[in-house]
Image: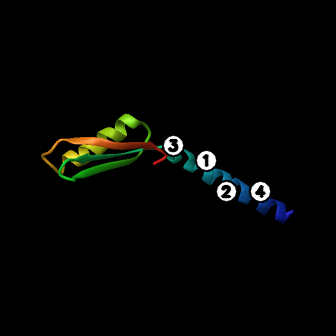
Amino acid sequence: MKTRSRLALTALVVCGTLAASMPQAFAWSCQAQADDGTYGYSYGFSNRRDARRRALAECNARTYDSCYIVDCQRNG
């Protein structure tokens, strides 16, 4: 009986861990860059728009040049 209880508890912990990590697995990340080589990035955002805004804000805070999005990916 103890073996079954331990096995059930282990399965419950594993399932809980996987369920908790799922939202992060579908997160957005973006990279922004300026012509002078300055960059900005974002990760862990639930939507692409917010990830783009953050990457651009990070880049623009470091340069006077205009920044542009280089790449955006889901699961980044």
- How far apart are the two marked residues, 4 and 3, measured between alpha carbons? 28 Å
Residue 2 image-quadrant placement: bottom right
Give the residue type at disc 3.
Answer: Phe
Q: Nearer the viewer, mark 4 or mark 1?
A: 1
In the image, 11: left or right of 71?
right
Relative depth, front residue between 61 and 38: 38
Q: Earlier in the sequence, mark 4 or mark 3?
A: 4
Q: Nearer the viewer, mark 2 or mark 1?
A: 1
Question: Circle 3 sits in a helix, a strand or a loop, which is it?
Answer: loop
| Percent x, y of residue 44 | 42, 47
Q: Which mark is residue 13?
A: 2
Q: Which mark is residue 26?
A: 3
Q: Nearer the viewer, mark 2 or mark 3?
A: 3
Q: Which mark is residue 19?
A: 1
Q: Which mark is residue 27?
A: none
Q: Which residue is mark 4?
A: 8
Give the residue type at disc 1.
Answer: Ala
Circles 1, 3 touching at the beta carbon (< 8 Å): no
- How far apart are the two marked residues, 4 and 2, measured between alpha carbons? 9 Å
Total labels drawn: 4
Q: Residue at x 72, y 60 (%)?
A: 10
**Residue lying at the far left of the rendered structure:** 64
Question: Circle 4 sits in a helix, a strand or a loop, which is it?
Answer: helix
Q: Earlier in the sequence, mark 2 or mark 1?
A: 2
- How far apart are the two marked residues, 4 and 1, measured between alpha carbons? 16 Å
Quarter the N terminus occupies: bottom right
Question: Circle 2 sits in a helix, a strand or a loop, which is it?
Answer: helix
| Percent x, y of residue 5 | 80, 60
Q: Residues within 10 Å of mark 3 (few under 14, many from 20)?
A: some
- How far apart are the two marked residues, 2 and 3, measured between alpha carbons? 21 Å
